Amino acid sequence: MTLTRAARRRALAVSVAAGVTGAALLGVALAESAGAATPSASSARTQSTHIVSLPAPPGSSTTRATGSSASSASAGSSATRSVAGTPTTAAVKVSGSKVPSGGQAQQVQLTSGQLPALSAEKWVATGAPSTRSIAGHDIGENECAKVDGASTWTQQAFSGGDGQNVAIQDTFVFTNAAAARSAYQNVVTGMDGCQQTTRALQAANKVALDASVTETAGQPEAAAWKRSWTGVMGMSAEGPQTNHYYLAVNGTRLIVLQFTEFPGQAAPYDVAADPQVLAMLDAELAA
């Protein structure tokens, strides 16, 4: 059963007070409550997932955070996140501090005009990028893969012109190139097994086992994937959707760019353009 906004807010309040967050508690409830009752992070490495949540698929009663509300939650609060790859596991809190402006010099920020599917989506940035110190925390990108070992993390969300689809750019800075390359390889490994991981998630939630994950482009230090499936509420939206993921690393920096398509909202994106997207990411990181 789909939670209403009020029900999700009440459930989130209970879970935050208990120090855990269920996989179904995303969207407006998360954006509005992420800054409340957040305990300090422990010194041990913890895992976490995106604070920017996907919009509800067409026809769903689920209300989700989009636009400036999601961005302000990212910029002004500690992030509440669930464990990548095991979305039913209790979450931990990320209480990373904001990085002073002088610490953002190494970040790479894409413009909306550089994103894939621009002609169909008409992307618009939602708010300003937010940079946080995340040493000791692993950031989950989806149910299959996480970025580990980064020292700082910058996130920027983009909204499609129809208000339904969303894109997210995550940029990570590491203390050395070896750590960045290791994190890159860990994401690749997670995505290589993503079809199996996603179908296991579907089976656990009694959803049709229709997940299909393919690598659409690859270079020595960049890769792209497409995942089509009936989504499960949690790190992803519920219902039919296609997720596109782009990964690139250069030196001490790593970018993960992703966007989601819901059926009928725009002309389907042609993955034949994915090599050009990777080339663009490579060029931005090399600049």
Image (spheres, rainbow, N blue to C red):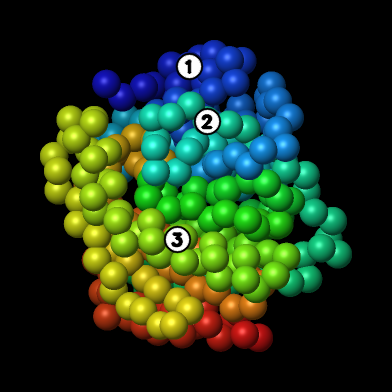
Q: Is residue 86 above or below residue 247?
A: above
Per the model, the C-alpha gap separating discs 1 and 2 is: 14 Å
Residue shown at the point (49%, 52%) measured from the top left:
146
Tell me the tag on residue 91. 2
- Among the 4 quarters of the image, the one containing residue 190: bottom left
x and y percentages locating residue 261 in the rendered image: 31, 57
The secondary structure type at the circle numbered 2 is loop
User: Within 10 Å of the Cα at label 1, are there few (<14), some (14-19), or many (20+) other Cα atoms?
Assistant: some
Q: Nearer the viewer, residue 274 or 157?
A: 274
**Label 1 vs 2, first from the N-terminus:** 1
Crowdedness near tag 3: few (<14), some (14–19) or many (≥20) residues, C-alpha within 10 Å: many
Q: Is residue 14 above or below residue 251?
A: above
Residue 101 visible here: yes
Question: What residue is rendered at 55% in x and 49% in y?
Answer: 139
Figure quadrant of residue 88: top left
Helix, strand or loop at disc 3?
helix
Real-space CA distance between mark 1 and mark 3, rounded to the nearest whole angstrom: 31 Å
Q: Which of 9 and 40 lies nearest the eye of the viewer?
A: 40
- Dot 3 corresponds to which residue? 187
Question: Is the N terminus in the top left, top right, bottom left or bottom right quadrant?
Answer: top left
Distance from Cα at disc 2 to Cα at disc 3: 20 Å
The residue under the point 72% across, 37% down is: 43
